[in-house]
Image (tube, rainbow, N blue to C red):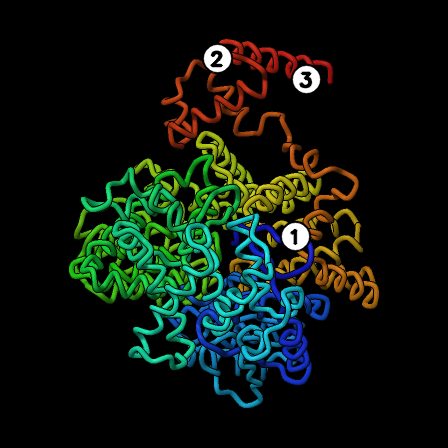
């Protein structure tokens, strides 16, 4: 799942934070190259403007690519094995299969017309070359625009060397009013005005502006770093200091520097203009991968040299000096270093001797963040936590790598990878999670609580990917560890995993037995996460075994537990469970109501599994109600998502059979030609539009539709609980009587009071007596 919501034209191009200057000729040439070749690589030194140029070109080409223009930032990615997963995640794909991901990605893209922008490929050059070559051979409608300091080296690749910005001829100085035709001058003036609004080109300063831009070789990043100095220096001071810097690098001669040395000199100068503590903070901030917020900077970068309370002021100074970029994301202020600046900082960090300590603080901070997320996951902050973890994804990767490379920290890495189990599932990053876990498990073998959890989490991911052999091995070892450690939680998860493996094999009776045992164990352990997760699978299996009353009871208990915790993610799964049961009872109205309620929740999380599940049930109920065009279109919408996910209907064979039966029956009833047309319309609908169609919200504001709740009358389980209240049972006695957790019983009681508008148990007892009397009276009059 992705926390981001899709909207408008397909794609994800980031908004530009500063004005884009010039480059019209370059953009036109890159477009021409892309029309002649499906792979164009922009090369050039760091700071040449490759990223901005690729983004502006891509923005101009959006109309040409019906499936979108997608920007993939690779600078923070260090593990080349995660390249395809990173691209798949950017495209909104859920990685649910155990296939090698490059062919899987190529297969998905095979019928797409889109532009893939791969930024900063140089450190992943070989992996990028393999992936791009595979995709281009499999997907004739895909074009790739890459940026790299070195070409990928593929056949058919067109290379565009990004030039520096245009400059006046030093021997033919144009008049001041003609300087606007030169890109380097325009950029300098634009950035100068940003820091000094009264700055303007005049006859007095035109020559100095040109000389500065020429001395900087027209390199965009160098110009931006220099223009910001106008806050404290005038033009002549800036030029003199540049001359001093460059003279040191050329041994005192006026020779021309290579462009990469020009930029290095500028960054050295930026560092020299920092105070000692600003320079130290710059180096420490370089450990962050993909950005950071103030809280993380304060926790990780502070010590006796920089007290925590001083970090905010020093950080603000680095922003003022254009060392750090500050930008608002989702209403929060976040910071990052440009990659060239970050690499310089890492060099300084190693030289300062602080690297080991700072990286350890970075690792520990994000390990603690993950554990806090797990603790609070079953609660009202689920969506916020998912957004936070996605935002910190690159930092989580860096922290995990730190666990594996630091002596004695492998178990910490396992702890972190296992604690993220809900994140791997909710985001669809199944293969990445499995890779983390397998690497951590390979680093040791001693039984520990962290290792036991990692084993069942890894096995869980293996079952999702239908890798039953690996899952079975994980379950066996997890059970062994649970026995050695006397760990009842691990034992319960091992039993659940055994049930999930049996489910993959279609062995319903064996699945039901194992999952029932696991549910009992989770209840004994008072583990609400285990209770809810097991309940989802057990309800589906129990329904398939046609024990529908039991399925309803389990589902209603789980939903009551969700509500007591204010949990919404797993609630969406349980609502789908209820819709499946109602559909099997031919109660199409209740099936549709439950599926729609689940779909509304799933939309909040962009939970692709549940969205696809609900499309299926709504299609099946539409068929039952003879709404055949609607059924065909919803089947198409579901098919589109299943192909993106890669594993239809959790691999449950009986559900897959239902799917094929429904599709065949709707086709036969509607006619092949009409069915194909409606089905294709469903396939082509963007997911957001398909959800609106499924919820029949076309004439309703989303707020109104989203606020609708499922039936407010008491459920069967709640009526059962109400009767027990009337009989004088306490919550604990109700829990024992119904074999449910006490917390679940308490939630049922709260629901009953809320739905009936009562404030006491005695009112419930009186209501039950009234209902019984009405039923007896009705019976006597029959």
| Tag in front: 1 or 3 | 1
Mark 2 neighbour density, 10 Å: few (under 14) some (14–19) many (20 or more): some
Q: Is residue 501 visible?
A: no
Where disc 3 sits, the SS reads helix
Dot 1 or dot 2, earlier in sequence: 1
Gap in angstroms between the C-alphas marked 1 and 3 = 56 Å
Where disc 2 sits, the SS reads helix
What residue is at 70 percent from the left and 44 percent from the top?
A: 695
Q: Nearer the viewer, residue 78 or 104?
A: 78
Q: Residue 249 appears in which quarter of the rendering?
A: bottom left
Mark 1 neighbour density, 10 Å: few (under 14) some (14–19) many (20 or more): few
Q: Is residue 241 visible?
A: yes
- The reply to whether the C-beta atoms of the residues labelled 1 and 3 are less than 8 Å apart is no
Drawn side of residue 7 relative to residue 739, left or right: right
Disc 1 target residue:
7
Picture layout, residue 702 above or below residue 669: above
Disc 3 target residue:
779
Dot 1 or dot 3, earlier in sequence: 1
Q: Provide residue 200's location: percent of width, then percent of height.
A: 59, 55
Gap in angstroms between the C-alphas marked 3 and 2 = 27 Å
Q: Nearer the viewer, residue 105 or 760?
A: 105
Q: Provide residue 465's location: percent of width, then percent of height.
A: 45, 64
| Tag in front: 1 or 2 | 1
Gap in angstroms between the C-alphas marked 1 and 2 = 48 Å
Q: Provide residue 774's location: percent of width, then percent of height.
A: 65, 13
Drawn side of residue 371 relative to residue 568, left or right: left
Disc 2 target residue:
761
Where disc 1 sits, the SS reads loop
Q: Nearer the viewer, residue 393 or 477?
A: 393
């Amino acid at each position: 799942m992705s926390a981001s919501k899709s909207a408008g034209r397909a794609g994800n191009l980031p908004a530009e934070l500063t004005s884009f200057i010039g480059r019209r000729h370059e953009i036109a040439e890159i477009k021409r190259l892309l029309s002649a070749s499906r792979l164009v690589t922009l090369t050039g030194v760091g700071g040449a403007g490759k990223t901005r140029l690729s983004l502006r070109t891509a923005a101009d080409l959006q109309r040409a690519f019906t499936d979108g223009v997608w920007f993939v930032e690779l600078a923070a990615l260090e593990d080349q094995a995660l390249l395809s997963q990173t691209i798949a995640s950017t495209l909104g794909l859920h990685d649910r299969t155990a296939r090698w991901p490059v062919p899987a990605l190529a297969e998905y893209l095979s019928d797409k017309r889109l532009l893939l922008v791969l930024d900063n490929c140089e450190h992943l050059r070989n992996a990028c070359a393999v992936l791009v070559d595979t995709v281009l051979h499999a997907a004739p409608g895909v074009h790739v625009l890459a940026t790299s300091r070195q070409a990928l080296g593929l056949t058919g690749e067109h290379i565009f060397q990004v030039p520096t910005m245009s400059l006046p001829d030093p021997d033919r100085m144009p008049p001041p009013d003609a300087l606007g035709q030169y890109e380097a001058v325009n950029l300098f003036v634009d950035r100068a005005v940003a820091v000094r609004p009264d700055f303007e080109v005049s006859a007095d300063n035109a020559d100095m502006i040109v000389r500065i831009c020429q001395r900087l070789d027209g390199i965009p990043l160098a110009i931006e770093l220099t223009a910001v100095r106008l806050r404290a220096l005038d033009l002549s001071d800036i030029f003199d200091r540049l001359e001093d810097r460059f003279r040191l690098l050329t041994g005192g001669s006026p020779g021309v520097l290579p462009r990469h040395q020009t930029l290095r000199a500028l960054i050295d100068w930026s560092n020299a203009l920092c105070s000692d503590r600003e320079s130290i903070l710059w180096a420490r901030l370089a450990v962050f991968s993909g950005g950071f917020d103030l809280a993380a900077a304060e926790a990780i970068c502070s010590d006796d040299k920089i007290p925590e309370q001083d970090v905010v002021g020093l950080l603000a100074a680095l922003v003022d000096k254009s060392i750090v970029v500050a930008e608002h994301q989702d209403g929060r202020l976040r910071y990052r270093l440009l990659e060239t600046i970050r690499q310089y900082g890492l060099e300084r960090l190693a030289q300062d001797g602080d690297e080991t300590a700072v990286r350890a603080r970075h690792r520990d901070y994000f390990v603690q963040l993950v554990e806090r997320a797990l603790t609070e996951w079953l609660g009202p902050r689920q969506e916020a936590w998912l957004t936070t973890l996605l935002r910190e994804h690159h930092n989580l990767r860096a922290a995990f790598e730190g666990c594996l490379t630091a002596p004695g920290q492998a178990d910490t890495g396992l702890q972190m990878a296992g604690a993220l189990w809900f994140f791997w599932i909710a985001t669809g990053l199944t293969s990445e999670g499995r890779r983390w876990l397998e690497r951590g498990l390979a680093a040791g073998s001693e039984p520990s609580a962290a290792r036991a959890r990692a084993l069942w989490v890894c096995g869980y991911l293996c079952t999702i990917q239908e890798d039953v052999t690996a899952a079975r091995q994980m379950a066996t070892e997890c059970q062994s560890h649970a026995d050695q450690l006397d760990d009842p939680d691990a034992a319960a998860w091992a039993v659940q995993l055994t049930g999930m493996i049996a489910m993959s094999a279609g062995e319903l009776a064996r699945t039901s037995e194992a999952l029932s045992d696991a549910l009992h164990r989770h209840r004994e352990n008072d583990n609400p996460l285990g209770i809810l997760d097991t309940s989802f699978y057990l309800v589906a299996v129990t329904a398939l075994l046609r024990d529908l009353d039991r399925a309803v009871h389990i589902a209603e208990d789980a939903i009551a537990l969700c509500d007591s915790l204010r949990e919404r993610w797993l609630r969406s799964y349980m609502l789908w469970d209820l819709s499946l049961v109602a559909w099997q009872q031919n109660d199409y109205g209740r099936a549709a109501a439950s599926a729609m309620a689940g779909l509304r929740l799933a939309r909040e999380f962009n939970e692709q599994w549940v969205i696809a599940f609900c499309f299926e049930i709504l299609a099946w109920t539409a068929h039952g109600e003879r709404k055949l065009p609607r059924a065909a279109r919803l089947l198409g919408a579901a098919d589109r998502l299943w192909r993106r996910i890669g594993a239809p209907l959790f691999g449950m064979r009986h559900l897959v059979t239902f799917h094929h039966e429904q599709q065949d029956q709707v086709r036969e009833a509607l006619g092949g030609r009409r069915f194909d047309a409606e089905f294709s319309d469903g396939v082509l609908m963007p997911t957001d539009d398909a959800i609106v169609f499924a919820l029949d919200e076309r004439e309703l504001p989303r707020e109104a539709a989203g606020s609708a709740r499922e039936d407010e009358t008491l459920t069967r389980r709640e009526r059962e609980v109400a009767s027990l209240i009337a009989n004088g049972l306490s919550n604990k006695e109700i829990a024992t009587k119904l074999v449910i957790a006490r917390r679940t019983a308490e939630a049922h009681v709260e629901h009953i009071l809320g739905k009936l508008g009562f404030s006491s148990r005695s009112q419930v007892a009186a209501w039950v007596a009234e209902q019984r009397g009405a039923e007896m009276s009705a019976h006597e009059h029959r």
